[in-house]
Image (tube, grey):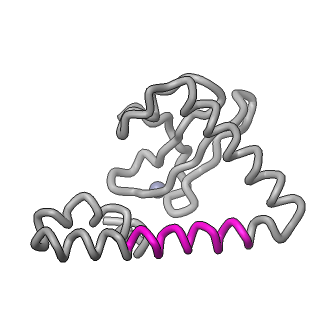
Amino acid sequence: MEKLTILDAAHTIRFHLGELLDADEAETLEHNLDALLKKAESDILALLCGNDITRKWTDEFLNAAEEVRKSYSGLPGVQSQASGGMLKYICPERNCTEYWYSRDADEDIPECPKHNKNLIKDRS
Ligand SMILES: [Zn+2]
């Protein structure tokens, strides 16, 4: 099993809080977790916007993702079926959490940095 990150844990545990805690605790924890995740996102955004090149890249990435979302109903778990500019690629190793979005059909598909294997289209 690949080493997962604390952010993976934070995103994933949100789906399980109802089973793990009583309703009040679950609600409070989810609320605090969401606030922290939002803060992390805005800190990351601020970092990426601190450099013209990464700001432009991030802008384009988020806009492309937005296009895909608009052309799709947005049900969770079915994003990878969306057509449009963005295609999700995943590592062929089971349990590997590396992924990457192709923004352009001509773009070279990168390798998983952990396994040095070519990423494959996500069909899940
Ligand atoms: Zn991998």
Horizontal side of residue 10 vs 13, given as left or right? right
Give the residue displayed 45% in from the left and 36% down from the top: 122
Asked whether 21 falls inside the magenta stretch, the response is no
Quadrant where the image shows the C terminus: top left
In this rendering, the answer to whether 100 lies above or below 30 is above
Look at 39% across and 66% down and name the residue there: 8
Tell whether 38 sits left or right of 102: left
Main secondary structure type of the part rendered in magenta? helix
Q: How many marks?
A: 0
Residue at the extreme front of the image, as rendered = 24
Image quarter where the N terminus lies is bottom left
Q: Is residue 44 magenta?
A: yes
What residue occupies the far right of the structure in this picture? 52
Residue 76: where, in percent of width, then height? 36, 40
The residue that appears at 87% across and 59% down in the rendered structure is 53
Q: Position of residue 9 (x, y in %)?
A: 34, 69
The quarter of the displayed image where residue 87 is located:
top right
Give coordinates of residue 26: x percent, y percent.
Answer: 20, 71
Taking the image as shown, residue 54 lies to the left or right of residue 81, namely: right
Pick whichever, 49 or 122, lies toward us. Answer: 49
Is 56 in front, or is 87? 56
**In terms of depth relative to the viewer, which is nearer, 83 or 35?**
35
Residue stretch in magenta = 33-46
Which residue is pictured at 27% across the width and 75% down the height? 28
Residue 22: image location, x then y, percent: 10, 72
* Position above or below: 120 against 55: above
